[in-house]
Image: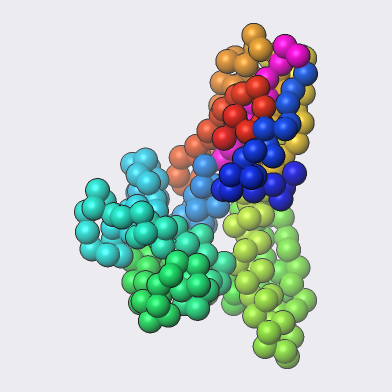
Amino acid sequence: MQNIPIRTALGREIRKAFIPKSGYKLIAADYSQIELRVIASLAQDEKMIRYFQKGEDIHSRTAANVNKIKIDQVTKEQRRAAKEVNFGVIYGLGSTGLAQRTGLSKAEAKEFIAKYFALHPQIKNWLEATKKLAVQQGYVETLLGRRRYLPDIHSGVPMIRAAAERMAVNAPIQGTAADLLKMAMIKIHEGLPKISPRTKMLLTVHDELVFEAPNQEVSRLSAFIKKTMENIYPLRVPVIVEVKAGKNWGECK
C-alpha cells in the first residue's frame, strides 16, 4: 500500500480499486508538508516559521527568494526545483542529485543550494550540529525523545559513515513526524467509540491515515480527525491536515 504511486495516472487508477463496504466511504487524512514543518521547528528557522505562520506556499516562497522575484512570478519549473531542495537538501541531496532531478546543470544546482543555505542559515547550522551530536553521543533523538542509535557514525569507511550522517539528520525529522502520527492514531482510536463507533481506522500510508466510515457520519468524523491530528503536539508552526472522503481511495486525493 505504501508503494502505490500517487503521481502517475496508473497509480491513481490502482487506488480506485480500494473501496469501502456498502453505505460507507473512505476518509483520508493527510499531514501537509509535516517534515518541513518539523525541520522549521527543530532548527528554529525564523524565515521558514514565518512563512508557515502566514500560510504561504513554502516551495513558491523558496523559489521566489532564491531567484529574487515576486512569489506570483514563480514558474512551475522554479517551484519544482525549490521543492526538491526543500525536501532533498535536508536529507543530504547534493548538487549532482538536484541536477538529475530538476534538469538544472550541476553548476546551477550547486548555486541554488548555496543560495538556499544563505537564506536559511539556521537550517544549515542545525544540520551540522546534529551530525556532530551524533558523533559525540552515538545517537540522535526525535523531538519527543525517541532515540535512533548510529554505530556506523564512527566507521572508517567514508561511504558507510556518510550514510550514517544522512540517517542522523533524517531520523529526528521523519521520526518526529512518525511520532506525531502514532500519537494521533492512539488519540483517534480512543475517541472513535464516542464519535463514530462503526468507523474503522484501516491503515497509515506515510503521513496519511485512512478510515472507513458510515456515509452519514463522514462530516462529523472528518472534523474530529482533523482537529485531533492538528493539535496532537505543538510545533513552532501551524500543523495542517487535509481531509478528503470518497467512494474509493482514489477519490481521497
Left or right: 64 as drawn, with respect to 17: left
Residue drawn at x 69%, y 47% is: 4
> What span is colored magenta in the figure?
22-31
Residue drawn at x 63%, y 51% is: 176
Asked if 206 appears above or below 112 in the picture, the reply is above
Q: Main secondary structure of the magenta part?
A: strand
In depth, the one of 104 and 221 nearer the eye is 104
Asked if 31 appears above or below 194 in the picture, the reply is below
Most extreme residue toward the top is 216
For residue 119, say whether it is visible.
Answer: yes
Residue 204, horizontal then vertical, whole percent: 72, 39
Which quarter of the figure has residue 167? bottom right
In depth, the one of 203 and 196 nearer the eye is 203
Left or right: 94 as drawn, with respect to 13: left
Q: Is residue 25 magenta?
A: yes
Residue 13, horizontal then vertical, whole percent: 65, 38
Q: How many marks?
A: 0
Residue 205, horizontal then vertical, whole percent: 69, 43
Residue drawn at x 58%, y 44% is: 9
In depth, the one of 74 and 38 nearer the eye is 74
In depth, the one of 47 and 86 nearer the eye is 86
Which quarter of the figure has residue 171? bottom right
Residue 122, horizontal then vertical, whole percent: 42, 66
